[in-house]
Image (cartoon, helix red, strand yellow):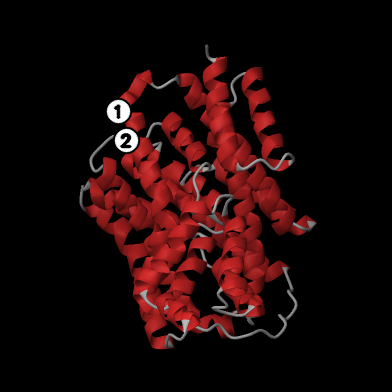
Amino acid sequence: MTTTHTASKDRNPWGVFLIFLRLGLTSFGGPVAHLGFFREEFVTRRQWLSDRSYADLVALCQFLPGPASSQVGIALGFSRAGYLGAFAAWAGFTLPSAIALIVFAIGLSSVGNSFSTGALQGLKIVAVAVVAQAVWGMARSLCTDVTRVTIMMLATCAVLLIPSVWSQVGVIILAGIAGIVLFKPAQLPPHDPLPIKISQRVGAFWLALFIILLIALPLASEAFTNQTLALVDAFYRAGALVFGGGHVVLPLLQAEVVPTGWVDEAVFLAGYGATQAMPGPLFTFAAFLGASMTASPSGWTGGIIALIAIFIPSFLLVVGALPFWESLRQNLRTQAALGGINASVVGLLLAALYQPVWTSAIVSAQDFALGLLALVALMFWKLPPWLVVIAGGLAGWLLSH
């Protein structure tokens, strides 16, 4: 009786929301850790799906652009309570860190120059360590041979020498083409079908809407001088074009908000450092940036708009791709293209590690020493990111006095 009652609660949006809210409050450690938390909660404990189905769902979400852990959560919510369940899963997992980051952004803008420049510098230096750790981890898993390392190197050089959002998009497309030409992946083994039912007609509608918005928003932003429309366009494109997880959104967002003067570069990096101390998805960095805008909308309004805009592509892609995944996952050309794309996104992140992260934060031997200490703390001492962030801000403040 109790088991049946619990299972029925799991199948309504409110029950889904409460489960993911607990995860959103406690899931520290980044996307890989989130996927581990999800597996423990939904495969081992609640048995919503089999281990092989879960692995297949993770593979789909890693194939799609956008934040893989959030997309897995959206799909799991959809499997239990339909579209409302998908929204409830996203809201529960995302809102705790998003709200905290908007509050931090508003506090940072209100205290202005009275906020210690040393503490701000400490947060920027921690961001260097976090991105360096992400580059190293992704390179070890995604750049496993000479060809992939070469694609990574060419991608890094291209985006550094031609700094724009569209050069990053072009690099991803060219890397996918190179992957088709250069890689010959093996056929995947059998698997359990995903326990999610969406017709291909409905899936095609959501994919078409994703593409229409990707094309129409930049055109509308050019045609009409409207800051809100420009904000939605910038964050929608960032959410739609990020392959490889949350850290890779850094160069796309930096190219959108810093050169335009929407967000000061020091504030951008401080916010990125603070995001590492938060549970839940790294894409909630968008909420910080929206709240930190120098022009209206900003504050709570800007934060909420930016947060929704960056996650809309994830919803459209997940529900759109699910009906086609069975055939797509067996397509060897698709797998080959993904091999090239994954190598290129490591290159994009490596370029971001240099510019703006390194060049803005490491300006003295003292900065380098603190950055090295933070990197060792993360990679070898295995300290939690939130602790390293707090310690970095405190160390920066102490060293500035």
Residue 244 picture quarter:
bottom right
Q: Which of 26 and 226 lies nearest the eye of the viewer?
A: 26
Q: Relative to 67, is 224 on the left or the right?
A: left
Please give the residue where the numbered disc 2 appears in the rendered image.
106
Residue 239 is labelled as none
Q: Which of 349 and 289 lies nearest the eye of the viewer?
A: 289
Q: Residue at position x 36%, y 80% from top?
A: 205
The reply to whether dot 2 and dot 1 touch (C-beta < 8 Å) is yes
Question: Mark 2, residues whose alpha carbon is within 10 Å: few (<14), some, or many (≥20)?
Answer: some
Q: Is residue 227 above or below residue 33?
A: above
Residue 367 picture quarter:
top right
Q: Relative to 392, is 379 on the left or the right?
A: right
Tell me residue 57's x, y (percent). 57, 74
- CA distance for labels 2 and 1: 6 Å
Please give the residue where the numbered disc 1 appears in the rendered image.
110
Can see residue 107? yes
* Residue type highlighted by circle 2: Ile
Question: Mark 1, residues whose alpha carbon is within 10 Å: few (<14), some, or many (≥20)?
Answer: few
Can see residue 360? no
* Residue type highlighted by circle 1: Ser
Q: Residue at position x 60%, y 35% from top?
A: 388
Q: Residue at position x 31%, y 54% from top?
A: 232
Q: Which of 193 and 388 lies nearest the eye of the viewer?
A: 388
Q: Secondary structure at mark 1?
A: helix
Q: Is residue 140 above or below residue 52?
A: above
Q: Residue at position x 47%, y 58% from top?
A: 22
Tell me residue 268's x, y (percent). 44, 36
Tell me residue 18's x, y (percent). 41, 64
Residue, far right: 146
Tell me residue 85's x, y (percent). 38, 73
Q: Secondary structure at mark 2?
A: helix
Q: Relative to 55, is 223 on the left or the right?
A: left
